[in-house]
């Protein structure tokens, strides 16, 4: 039911958050492209779900990436997106249930907005499985390093979060 007012408590309950310590509001962004996957414990945010007449479902998932002119020239030359960008959008296709749809990456030159290029591709189950395996291996490596005392749990926090924690416990 829309009350035309933002109800933060309702939002947090709907998103299944039990508690929140800090809230950051990023103006100009929203949760429309949120792709939570509780089973895999991954959350992603695609930039746009578009109407796409060339896609079997009529839907496409797109992400916008800014890059240097040099990197953009290389992408144009190969006609292929950067691997990590393709993996990201491929995951979004799967997470949104749009595996029969097309994925797109729209590259824009950071210094010349008129220099752009869009790359489209089909969903790949093989690429998704490889991507998820990379995530599992990275998590395993981190857990092993924690268990062996090579790194501490505190090192998993960003510097900003580390300062917040210190501020909370400092006298």
Image (cartoon, grey):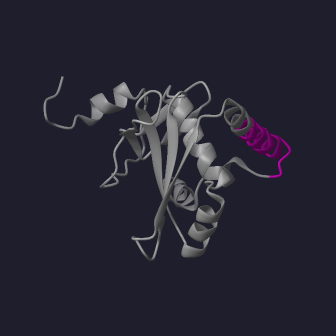
Nearest the viewer among 65 and 19 is 65
Based on the picture, tell me whether residue 83 belongs to the magenta stretch. Answer: no
Measured along the vertical axis of the image, is residue 70 above or below residue 37? below
Q: What x and y, as percent, mark residue 100?
A: 53, 27
Q: Look at 45% across and 77% down and name the residue there.
A: 111
Viewport quadrant of the N terminus: top left
| Residue 85, percent from left and from top | 59, 51
Q: Which residues are magenta?
A: 133-150
Query: x, y (%) of residue 66?
Result: 49, 64
Q: Main secondary structure of the magenta part?
A: helix
How far from the left and from the top, in percent, is residue 70? 60, 74
Using the image as rendered, state which of residue 133 and residue 93 is in the foreground.
Answer: 93
Q: Residue at x 39, y 39 (%)?
A: 49
Q: Is residue 126 left or right of residue 107?
A: right
Q: From what the image shows, is residue 113 above or below residue 101?
A: below
Q: Quadrant of residue 90?
A: top right
Q: Is residue 85 left or right of residue 61?
A: right
- Is residue 142 highlighted in magenta? yes
Residue at 40% from the left image edge and 31% from the top image edge: 58
Pick whichever, 120 or 26, lies toward us. 120
Looking at the image, which residue is at 50% across and 46% down? 104
Residue occupying the far bottom of the picture: 111
């Amino acid at each position: 039911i829309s009350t035309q007012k933002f109800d933060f408590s309702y939002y947090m309950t709907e998103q299944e958050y039990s508690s929140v310590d800090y809230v950051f509001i990023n103006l100009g962004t929203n949760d429309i492209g949120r792709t939570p996957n509780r089973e895999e414990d991954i959350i992603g945010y695609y930039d746009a779900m578009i109407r796409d007449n060339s896609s079997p479902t009529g839907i496409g998932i797109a992400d916008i990436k800014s890059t240097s002119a040099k990197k953009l020239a290389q992408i144009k030359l190969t006609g292929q997106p950067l691997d990590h960008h393709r993996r990201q959008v491929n995951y979004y296709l799967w997470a949104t249930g749009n595996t029969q749809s097309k994925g797109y990456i729209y590259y824009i030159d950071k210094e010349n907005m008129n220099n752009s290029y869009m790359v489209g591709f089909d969903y790949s189950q093989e690429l998704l499985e490889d991507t998820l395996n990379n995530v599992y291996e990275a998590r395993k490596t981190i857990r092993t390093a924690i268990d062996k005392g090579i790194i501490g749990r505190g090192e998993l926090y960003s510097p900003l979060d580390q300062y917040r924690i210190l501020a909370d416990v400092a006298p």
